[in-house]
Image: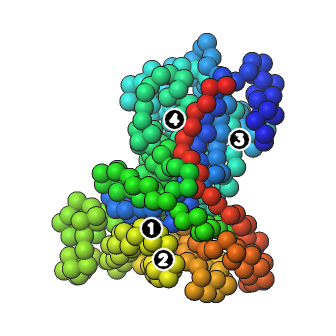
Amino acid sequence: MPVDLFNTKFEQLYKKPAEALASAPGRVNLIGEFTDYNNGFVLPCALEFTTRILFRKRDDNQVIVHSLHYPGECDKFSIDDEISRGDSQWGNYIRAVAYVLKRQGHLLSGVDLLIDSTVPQGSGLSSSAALEVAVGGVFNHLCQLNLSGEEIALLGQEAENDFMNCQCGIMDQLVSANGQKGQALLIDCQSLTTESVAIPEDLSIVIVNSNYPRKLVDSEYNQRRIDCEQAAKKMSIATLRDADIKKLNAARSAMSDNEYKRAHHVITENSRVIKATQALKNNDMPKLRELMTASHQSLRDDFEVTVPETDGLVDICQEALGDEGAVRMTGGGFGGAIVCLCRHSDIDKIKSAVEKHYFSRFNIQASIYVGKAGDGLQVTVL
Ligand code: GLA
């Protein structure tokens, strides 16, 4: 919704104009999947799809939340009371961030909020991280908390881990907080140091959402994390960041098949991220293709987080692009989206191949977005 209309809506709801706007993006991960919570490397970029929140400080301690996507629904809670989960699934993300801020001892105040978002939901493009980071931006500004982007990201991750019960890593929140226009972000998830890597001018990022309904995602996701932690334990190391194939094979007999395969994925994926970062800097499509193909296969066979729909989409798009593109699933898996890197002139090849083959094979329509690397969290006073 255009900013003017968004402001008018706020004023209609709350009878006063908004004071400021917080905006945080979704992300697409180019490579480095399920490595973040193993203290490894990831290479995502923030997108131009954002979650925007208009807000105004209240005189009391109530937090009132409306969303343009759920007209007629409203979530309300008091920051004076113990913050627990409410009936609104999306409202719970606001509660989650308030909960972790309060737990850290920050003094919060009441606020009126109105949310709008262009981040596609349920597609593995981090609509929830965008919401958490935007809410972090709201309270940071409102209560003058002086938090850095990294601190806001860590709070968002804690909100997921301790309030929403998803044991995610730091990738989504950190790139949503600190992403930069035109750049991918190489993140070392152990030290949280980052390096911006320019996306070559002639490279397009095409995201194809399988629209396959994601089910039981959190329990499967959390189980993968447990498998990885068990594998690290059996190698007597703190996290899989410190593993290599030699250590893995030496401990193989102590591991279940799943533990072995999960660890194998993480070890090989970490090395692919480093190589892919170099390939992106060199605008080296054949190398990117080799690494992204290997990443997808590893996610399919070792980490087992793909579904026939995302495998099929990867095949359809890779075949359409031939040597001229690199394709893999992206994000938390079990459905969701795939990402293709290609030249601008080849975007139409993806569109027509998906149109021609995907629905007829899987009976679902895919959605295609041409993604641009956008900026991270911004808060603007109106
Ligand atoms: C989700 C999580 C991230 C990361 C990815 C997989 O997006 O939120 O922390 O683990 O899955 O790479």
Can you identify the residue that label 2 sits on?
Answer: 284
Distance in Å between CA atoms under marks 4 and 3 = 16 Å
Residue 116 marker = 3
Point out the tag, 1 or 3, that comes first from the N-terminus: 3
Can you identify the residue that label 4 sits on?
Answer: 136
Q: What amino acid is at disc 4?
A: Gly
Assign a secondary structure to mark 4: helix
> Where is 114 relative to 129, above or below?
above
Assign a secondary structure to mark 2: loop
Point out the tag, 1 or 4, that comes first from the N-terminus: 4
Q: What amino acid is at disc 2?
A: Asp
Distance in Å between CA atoms under marks 2 and 1 = 8 Å
Of residues 354 and 48, the one nearer the viewer is: 48
The answer to whether mark 1 is within 8 Å of ligand 1 is no
> Where is 339 relative to 94, above or below?
below
Q: Which image quadrant for residue 93?
A: top right
The answer to whether residue 370 is visible is yes
The answer to whether mark 2 is within 8 Å of ligand 1 is no
Q: What amino acid is at disc 1?
A: Lys
**Image location (x, y in percent) of residue 62:** 60, 21
Distance in Å between CA atoms under marks 2 and 4 = 37 Å
Left or right, 29 with reference to 67: left
The reply to whether callout 1 and callout 4 are in contact (CB within 8 Å) is no
The answer to whether residue 226 is visible is no
Can you identify the residue that label 1 sits on?
Answer: 281
The reply to whether callout 3 and callout 2 are in contact (CB within 8 Å) is no
